[in-house]
Image: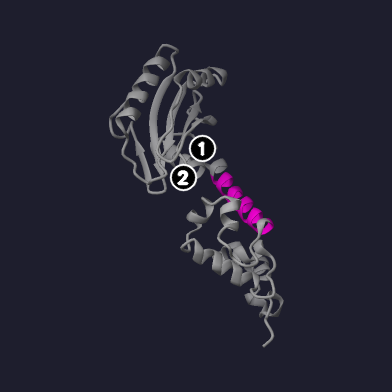
Amino acid sequence: MRKFSIKDWAVDDQPRKKLMQNGSSSLSNAELLTILINSGNAFLSANDIAKHLLNATENSLHKLATLSVKEIVNLKIKGLGEAKAIAIAASLELGIRRQSDTIQRKQVSSSKDVASYLQASMQYLQREVFAIVLLNRANRIIHFEIVSEGGITGTVADPRIILKRALEYNATGIILCHNHPSGNLKPSQADEMLTRKIKNAAAFLDILVTDHIIVSHEGYFSFADEGML
């Protein structure tokens, strides 16, 4: 039996043509991945490879976005080599950056605004990192930076580095943030102690620590919202 390729499908079922006619939102996740994968092999069509990839990641784009190129290749899906894995990883990263860029242009008026920005930037990381969001007088984000990286269970932040960055960017406000890859959003005693330490040190420089936000794929926790600042 002859194996059908994408070109043999009805026009409405061809992902590229469907996208051109109806827009990208009309495509399923498998169809979008099919376009990125581009071609199949003697055993699987590009669409088959896309479906196998989604199945291997529990049909979760979030889980797929956490995988490195090497981890995608190590799924051992026939027809999905390094070149295709790179295209998929690059596309997912562009989506993450687009979301971050959109949120960054907004004025920060609540913890939700910042949490959305942080989740877009940090929720897919598989190890814990500590980052800072620097604000100007208009409460707009002027800089985001990961200041330390740890392992799966923790990281340590240096208050001197954080305050140095704030001075370099003439920031008037700092939002501390870190992620919990496990999904647990409860702050540790060490988190609380570090928050107080940085807040007290920043006060001497007339810089306000407005929040400390913990993010994960499960949501976020705001020290400010919980009255812990």
Q: Is residue 185 above or below residue 156?
A: below
Residue 27 shows in this picture: no
Residue 179, image x, y percentages:
43, 39
Q: Amino acid at mark 1?
A: Lys
Report which residue position mark 2 lands on: 123
Q: What type of secondary structure mainly makes up the magenta span?
A: helix
Front residue of 21 and 208: 208
Residue 107, image x, y percentages:
49, 34
What residue sits 42% from the left and 17% below the top? 202
Specify which label sits upstream in the sequence, 2 or 1. 1
Q: Quadrant of the C terminus?
A: top left
Total number of numbered labels? 2
Residue 112, image x, y percentages:
40, 40
Residue 89 among magenta residues? yes
What residue sits 61% from the left and 71% below the top? 47
Dot 2 falls on a residue whose secondary structure is: loop
Residue 65, image x, y percentages:
53, 52
First to last magenta residue range: 83-99
Occupied quadrant, residue 156:
top left
Q: Amino acid at mark 2?
A: Gln
Q: Is residue 188 above or below residue 159?
A: below
What residue sits 67% from the left and 88% below the top? 1
Report which residue position mark 1 lands on: 106
Q: Nearer the viewer, mark 2 or mark 1?
A: 2
